[in-house]
Image (cartoon, rainbow, N blue to C red):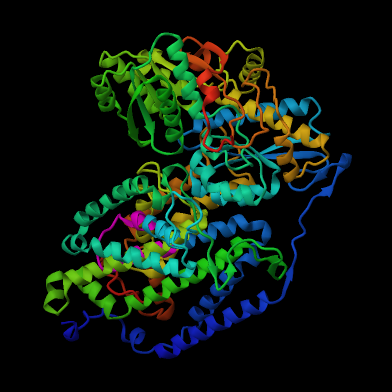
């Protein structure tokens, strides 16, 4: 009976910081500046810097998927390595729902409007996640992690076998162009311009991805701060206590899995649009929907701070952005120019940085970027009060930063 | 308080959205497409100035194909150096801009927009997953690319300039060679181990076609590119009584299959596609078992007595004395030679724009690379430009590890084979 549910006690905080503090102007201004920068990014990088825009889009894919996983791993306390599978289901689902039925005799395409297809793909992923609920609801921790890993292998096999949906590992299938009320997210002549910068396919996709990411961000923040989030944390911290407070543990755990899968599904749709291609991987270790990606998403939530929504976004920027940023820089500014036959290349350096980030976070700041951010904010608010430390817990009980 | 903050935030978002809409409404301009006339009265658009022609490489010097990739890059560069020393093309020097995608499609997708505006076309584009992801971009940008990936499944794109023959035809010719040598006969059973995907799938098409012609039964085994122990599969094939094994695999898998072939006492001849062998295998414990491997490839092996190949490899050894020696070097050089033919034809037609270069390609009916690959004919899109291969056998005593055992030839079965996008 969730009506009788009472939230767990809030962490002890100095009364001055919880009861009343003035509007946080710094935060509001910073948010506004960030939003303006994000909205004007295509103008800032210009038509010559499309590669950086492509990189930024990629980070948003990681952010949407990472937000979904941080809810599951950090808030509901369930380890999952199945994210790449749901990415694949989302990508293939979108291609099947929006695909042109006339495109090929060998491919299934329903020809639905792209927006409907996106929503359909997300719902489909949620349903597939629900099908996994009997497992997700009964297992926890590393057991669920290993069980969910099987889905990545299932995805590999299904992608190879069901080539009427996936297009097969050989050449895959085209990702249908996204369109909204007749406005296509593709190149056009003439192209509209903002401050002299032509708004072509990549600029349009940036705004689309930004909208997807903002919606995901605010939905996740809403969930975390509402009764759903409290029930997730109750289940995470102590299942017996949660049960005694009237939380239906199995249902809550399954629900968290469904929601996380739906976020991954949206990230999958974005991947398909970003690559212009839906193509299952040729093996389980490398590729778009492989074990490497499962680890990358786990790294996103660990670096970001388990359970923190803004943390997941920062983690995505580090994990998904760093390597490609180094590569772009090495091309543009000639870094690592003499790496023709092995040695230090951008790929190697970024692998070191990303590995070191995980080790350092786990050793010195188990709360991740989110904990660093929280501590900085707390210090600024009340310089005379010692920072409200988490008391050595690896996950924050409540995420309000 | 919270409500007030929320309202403030919503107002901010609304304001930001409104301002961006306002900016969006600022104007609309038509893209000024189309080439301009440059030096020598030649039309140019991207990647060509009055003094230089810039070509791109999207290669792999850090991923799974880094040995081959480095060889290809070196071969491309050797060609550019030779051309420039001889005065360039169309009065312009050739420059090559290199990016390394590490065999990752997502990395390639980000790097492409940075490279694309600077180059006329791609002298080398490595990797089938990368090629698949970039195909829409190549079409959109009207770009001509020479792939370091030889599947006949990509020939539906007129922007793909295949250098040499395709995997399916390598297998058809290779099996014909084995039969000529009396190593297999009509009605035999042969095994084919292939990686699921573009590479393996295309190789399998070749053995299926050959088997149909000769009443041969194929014992197929599908693997993923990361399965590194093929002992179980080879054991199964021994049980099925195979007279030969065909491999469309990675070099590591080749070593495993050959080691098993020897250890199980099967000792049948093994035929591999062009990328199945890497000279680095000669330094592995499987080295003694490699002698059974025949490699079918459109390119002359590193140790080929062909005079042009000797010239290229000598140049390579001077320029890169410590670099690994593999078939990538001559392949890379050949890619350059074909590009040279295309650029010269385009120059003659007075159009070095991207569209002009693509048109020039279709006018080429007999590109002669002095025997590095068979004579190439690009006049029928969808059809592989040649069907001829060299057969080489593994031999640790020669440079590059492969000894040529059959000169360039085309089997009758390869002449009749119809590629997936071939017209007529």
**At which x and y percent is residue B402?**
49, 15
Q: Please tell me how many numbered marks the rendered image carries.
A: 0
The quarter of the displayed image where residue B20 is located: bottom right
- Pick the front one: B393 or A137: B393
Taking the magenta stretch, the answer to whether it contains residue A66 is yes
**Left or right of A319 on screen, residue A385:** left
> B138 above or below B71?
below
> A186 above or below B79?
below
Residue shown at 42%/76% (left/top)? A218
Q: Is residue B321 something one can see in this rendering? A: yes
**Left or right of B347 on screen, residue B401:** left
> B362 above or below B328?
below
Taking the magenta stretch, the answer to whether it contains residue B260 is no
Residue shown at 50%/56% (left/top)? A102
Q: Which residues are magenta?
A: A62-87
The quarter of the displayed image where residue A379 is located: bottom left
- Pick the front one: B42 or A94: A94
Dominant secondary-structure state across the stretch colored magenta: helix
**At which x and y percent is residue B3?**
41, 90
The quarter of the displayed image where residue B146 is located: top right
- Pick the front one: B157 or A289: B157
**At which x and y percent is residue B378?**
66, 32
Q: Quadrant of the C terminus of chain A?
A: bottom left
């Amino acid at each position: 009976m969730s009506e009788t549910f009472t939230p767990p006690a809030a962490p002890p905080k100095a009364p001055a910081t919880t009861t009343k503090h003035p509007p946080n102007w710094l935060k509001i201004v910073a948010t506004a500046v960030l939003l303006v920068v994000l909205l004007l990014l295509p103008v800032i990088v210009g038509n010559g810097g499309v590669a950086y825009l492509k990189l930024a889009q990629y980070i948003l894919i990681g952010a949407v998927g990472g937000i979904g996983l941080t809810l599951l791993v950090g808030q509901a306390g369930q380890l999952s390595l199945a994210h790449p599978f749901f990415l694949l289901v989302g990508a293939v689902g979108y291609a099947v729902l929006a695909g042109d039925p006339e495109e090929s005799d060998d491919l299934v395409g329903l020809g639905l409007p792209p927006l409907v297809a996106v929503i359909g793909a997300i719902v489909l992923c949620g349903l597939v996640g629900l099908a996994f609920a009997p497992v997700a609801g009964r297992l926890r921790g590393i057991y669920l992690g290993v069980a969910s890993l099987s889905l990545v292998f299932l995805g590999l096999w299904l992608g190879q076998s069901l080539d009427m949906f996936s297009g097969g590992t050989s050449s895959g299938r085209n990702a249908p162009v996204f369109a909204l009320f007749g406005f296509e997210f593709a190149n056009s002549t003439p192209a509209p311009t903002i401050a002299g910068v032509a708004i072509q396919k990549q600029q349009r996709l940036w705004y689309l991805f930004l909208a997807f990411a903002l919606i995901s961000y605010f939905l996740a923040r809403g969930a975390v701060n509402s009764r759903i989030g409290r029930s997730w944390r109750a289940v995470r911290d102590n299942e017996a206590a949660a049960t005694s407070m009237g939380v239906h543990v199995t249902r809550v755990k399954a629900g968290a899995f469904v929601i996380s899968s739906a976020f991954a599904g949206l990230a999958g749709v974005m991947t398909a649009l970003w690559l212009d291609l839906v193509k299952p991987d040729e093996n389980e270790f490398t590729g778009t929907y492989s074990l490497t990606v499962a680890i990358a998403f786990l790294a996103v939530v660990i670096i970001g701070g388990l359970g923190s929504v803004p943390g997941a976004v920062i983690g995505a920027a580090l994990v998904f952005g760093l390597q490609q940023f180094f590569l772009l820089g090495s091309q543009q500014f000639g870094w690592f120019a003499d790496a023709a036959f092995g040695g230090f290349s951008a790929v190697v350096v970024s692998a070191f940085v990303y590995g070191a980030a995980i080790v350092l976070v786990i050793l010195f700041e188990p709360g991740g970027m989110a904990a660093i951010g929280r501590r900085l904010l707390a210090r600024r608010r009340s310089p005379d009060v010692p920072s409200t430390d988490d008391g050595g817990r690896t996950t924050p009980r409540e995420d309000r930063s | 308080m919270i409500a007030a903050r929320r309202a403030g935030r919503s107002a901010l978002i609304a304001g930001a959205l409104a301002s961006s809409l306002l900016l969006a409404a600022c104007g609309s301009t038509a893209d000024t497409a189309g080439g301009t006339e440059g030096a020598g009265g030649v039309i140019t658009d991207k990647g060509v100035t009055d003094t230089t022609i810039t070509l791109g490489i999207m290669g792999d010097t850090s991923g799974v194909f880094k040995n081959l990739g480095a060889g290809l890059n070196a071969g491309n560069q050797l060609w550019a150096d030779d051309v420039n020393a001889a005065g360039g093309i169309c009065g312009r020097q050739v420059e090559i801009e290199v990016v390394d995608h590490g065999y990752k499609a997502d990395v390639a997708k980000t790097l492409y927009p940075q490279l694309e505006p600077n180059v006329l076309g791609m002298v080398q584009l490595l990797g089938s997953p990368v090629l698949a992801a970039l195909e829409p971009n190549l079409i959109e940008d009207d770009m001509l690319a020479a792939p370091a990936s030889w599947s006949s499944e990509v020939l539906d794109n007129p922007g793909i300039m295949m250098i040499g023959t395709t995997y399916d035809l390598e297998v058809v010719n290779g099996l014909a060679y084995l039969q000529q040598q009396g190593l297999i006969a009509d009605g035999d059973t042969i095994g084919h181990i292939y990686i699921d995907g573009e590479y393996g799938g295309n190789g399998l098409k070749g053995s299926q076609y050959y088997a149909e012609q000769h009443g041969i039964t194929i014992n197929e085994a599908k693997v993923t590119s990361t399965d590194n122990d093929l002992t179980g599969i080879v054991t199964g094939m021994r049980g099925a009584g195979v007279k030969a094994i065909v491999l469309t695999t990675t070099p590591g898998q080749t070593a495993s299959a050959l080691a098993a072939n020897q250890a199980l006492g099967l000792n049948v001849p093994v035929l591999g596609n062009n990328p199945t062998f890497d000279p680095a295998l000669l330094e592995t414990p499987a080295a003694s078992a490699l002698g059974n491997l025949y490699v079918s490839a459109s390119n002359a092996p590193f140790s080929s007595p062909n005079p042009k190949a000797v010239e290229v490899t000598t140049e390579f050894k001077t320029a890169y004395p410590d670099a690994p020696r593999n078939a990538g070097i001559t392949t890379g050089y050949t890619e350059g030679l074909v590009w040279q033919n295309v650029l010269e034809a385009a120059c003659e037609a007075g159009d070095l724009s991207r569209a002009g270069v693509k048109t020039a390609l279709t006018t080429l009916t007999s590109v002669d690379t002095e025997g590095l690959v068979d004579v190439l004919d690009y006049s029928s899109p969808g059809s592989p430009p040649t069907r001829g291969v060299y057969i080489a056998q593994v031999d640790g005593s020669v440079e590059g590890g492969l000894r040529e055992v059959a000169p360039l030839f085309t089997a009758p079965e390869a002449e009749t084979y119809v590629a997936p996008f071939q017209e007529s």
